[in-house]
Image (tube, grey):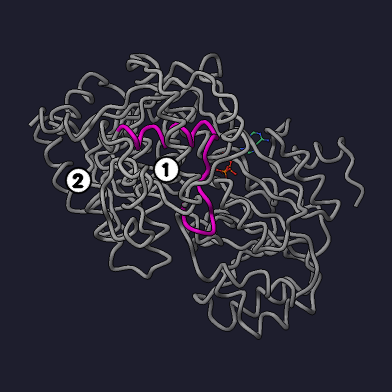
Amino acid sequence: MEATSKNLTSYLKKYFGFDQFKGQQHEIITSLLNKEDVFVLMPTGGGKSLCYQLPALMSDGVAIIVSPLIALMKNQVDAIRGISENDGIAHVLNSSLNKSETKTVMTDIKNGITKMLYVAPESLTKEEYIDFFKSVEISFFAIDEAHCISEWGHDFRPEYRNLKAIINKIGDAPIIALTATATPKVQEDIQKTLGMQTAKVFKDSFNRTNLFYEVRPKVNQDKEIVKFIKQNEGKSGVIYCLSRKKVEEFSQLLQVNGINAIPYHAGLDAKTRSKHQDMFLMEDASVVVATIAFGMGIDKPDVRFVIHYDMPKSLESYYQETGRAGRDGGEGHCVAFYDYKDIEKLEKFLASKPVAEREVGMQLLSEVVAYAETSMSRRKFLLHYFGEEFDETDGAGAMMDDNMRNPKKMIEAKDDALTALDIILKTSQKLKLNDVVNVLVGKETSVTKSYNLQNEDFFGIGKSKEDYYWKSILRQLIVHSLLEKEIETYGTLKVTKEGKEFISNPTSFKIAEDVDFKKLLMEGG
Ligand code: ADP
């Protein structure tokens, strides 16, 4: 079909009632209709669904939409059916259907009635379905939550790994992959795994300029949160805890303090969950205390704060969870309570996992620690994590975090930066961050011994400073792109082109003095 600008807009109006495309939707849809592979990186709320729903409605044949969450699929199908008189326009195909329901789905597809078929990845792999799909016209494949393909992502699902092989068996329709949370590593992995290296990539900025980011040491957090909520009376918020037990305890504590807090976690029965969700959505000033089970597909525009009682397991999760604040563009205050002990607990939990999963989990956690402990612009840190440059001096939202509002002392660290880079080169760029720190402070470990580093004259060259200082130097070298972490080796540090330029022509390298959270916690009791 010839997709002119004018008729795209008229289809948008006809099916969805919108007058204009949001962000890059128009370009994305045009590319897909031109049979190109497309990769879409857009924050939550950016309008990803429409990027495949509209072209699916406009194309001959059926679009196969792979999505990991059955509940979300059902919501989407219901929404699509709402815009058409024809219930067959969208279907879900999964193991919960009985024989006759499955037959109806297949008949509707054969008759060209169905434009969108939502499938879970494990259903797509069934032989009988593959044969069926070969016999019908497929407009394109949409892979939603595409980061699930990557072991480097925070939500790896092995079933996603086989998708490309199955798609190849079925035919050669174009692919659109969509995700809200892909770091550059994950993006590369997704494109490789789906064989879409030449895809057109559309990336929206991840900068949520109306959100204020803050990290507080986890000391007297119960009192602090009660105080915070009382200061923000009349506003809605979400408090995330890692365990169901903590959700129960803390929501009770809030209730005792006269705050109408609603608990939410996957251990509550379905009826209670949906009741609590409705209470949160309906009431103006409601506070929900929840595990990460809460939030998927919840669209409350006026959430004014998101508090992390515990740090999440990755910055992807952190970004997604804080992203539920201020969706209407208004104020959104994001506070995370950080205690390194919580990280250690999560690390212990990872110890029982298979090696690959453990290594990735540790890597993701180390980024959370770096974020929590940094003294630099938190917005710059987060955006760098998602592969986006940000100018902390005058970028949009630059002053919207604790570190920028109350800057820490800056110190000149040119010589130390050079020392750290020198050690990395001298050890042939085969060490990870903690190992480099150990070499600098002269701490013998199994790794330093295995390379015989304790006999080198540079071993312990930085021992006049503490390990947290060197960690901070290394992290800031990474954030300023003078160093990078190698993907294949799970995080060995490598000097970048910029790093080499810095070595041959050193300029000022000012860093913000990092807060020593361990010390602070000891002082705070
Ligand atoms: P995502 O999947 O990226 O989180 P959604 O597809 O759920 O985002 O869309 C977020 C919201 O934006 C939805 O309420 C949707 O109806 C709305 N939306 C999408 N496209 C447009 C548009 N062109 N104009 C106005 N609203 C839109």
Instruction: Name which residue type carries label 1.
Output: Leu
**How would you rate the neighbour count of disc 1 (Cα within 10 Å): few for under 14, some for 14-19, many for 20 or more?**
many
The residue under label 1 is 315
Q: Quick one: SS at disc 1?
A: helix
Residue 43 position within the rendered picture, expressed as x and y whole percent measured from the top left? 56, 39
The answer to whether residue 294 shows anywhere in this view is no
Whether ligand 1 has any atom under 8 Å from the Cβ at mark 2 is answered as no
The residue under label 2 is 341
**Label 2 vs label 1: CA separation?**
18 Å
Number of marks in picture: 2
> Which portion, as a residue range, is magenta?
469-491
Quadrant in the picture for the C terminus: top left
In the rendered image, residue 138 lying in the magenta stretch gets the answer: no
Q: Quick one: SS at disc 2?
A: helix
Residue 421 position within the rendered picture, expressed as x and y whole percent measured from the top left? 48, 37
Whether ligand 1 has any atom under 8 Å from the Cβ at mark 1 is answered as no
Q: Indicate the quadrant where residue 214 lies.
A: top left
The answer to whether residue 229 shows anywhere in this view is yes
Residue 455 against residue 60 in the figure, above or below: above
The residue lying toward the viewer, choosing from 90 and 503, is: 503
